[in-house]
Amino acid sequence: MKKTKDQEQDFVLRHYAEGRFDPEAALKKLRPRPIRRRWVAAAASLLCIVAFASVLTWQLSKPKQPLPTPATESVVSTHEEPDVAHFSFNDTPLPDVLSQLGRYYGVTLEANDSTRHLTGEFSGEQLDDIIGMIEEVLSVKITRH
């Protein structure tokens, strides 16, 4: 059943009392309380600072890992015999390998393909034997100067 305008007005007139209804107070009750933007900004800033400090503390507390040694570094050491050289190469470019060997044996070495890399160890071998092994394994030609 639909109310007519007259019925609505009669209802309001019967139940209305002067000063009983304050529209401003009712609207204030219905409006949500605004959150102050400064408080929100301060809380967000504090949260960012705490997160940054946590990450920084975590990074500083991690154990430091040693830097890897360069791949071109060769290890020359003597084990049992004082005059025996030991060379160790790990994915070292061929020109660097030949430079290390050339410095130790006092010669200049060049290869026809300088794009190759070598991983291996040589201990107590003669230079000719080392050159022969490198040529066979990498399929290159090495010349002395």
Image (cartoon, rainbow, N blue to C red):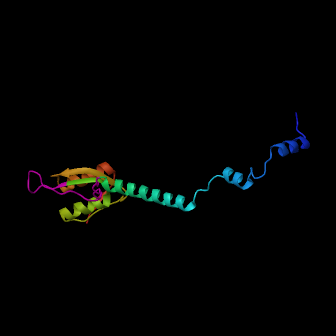
Q: Residue furthest front?
A: 18
Quadrant in which the C terminus appears: bottom left
Q: Nearer the viewer, residue 145 or 14?
A: 14
Q: Quadrant of residue 109?
A: bottom left
- Residue 12 in the image: state x and y as whole percent: 83, 45
Q: Residue at x 85, y 46 (%)?
A: 13
Q: Residue furthest left?
A: 81
Q: Is residue 62 left or right of residue 85?
A: right
Q: Quadrant of residue 65?
A: bottom left
Q: Nearer the viewer, residue 145 or 97?
A: 97
Q: Is residue 127 magenta?
A: no
Prevalent SS, magenta region: loop
Q: Is residue 80 magenta?
A: yes
Q: Residue furthest top?
A: 1
Quadrant in which the N terminus appears: top right
**Against 38, is 4 above or below?**
above
Q: Residue at x 58, y 56 (%)?
A: 35
- Residue 28 in the image: state x and y as whole percent: 68, 54
For the record, the magenta segment spans 63-86
Q: Nearer the viewer, residue 22 or 145?
A: 22
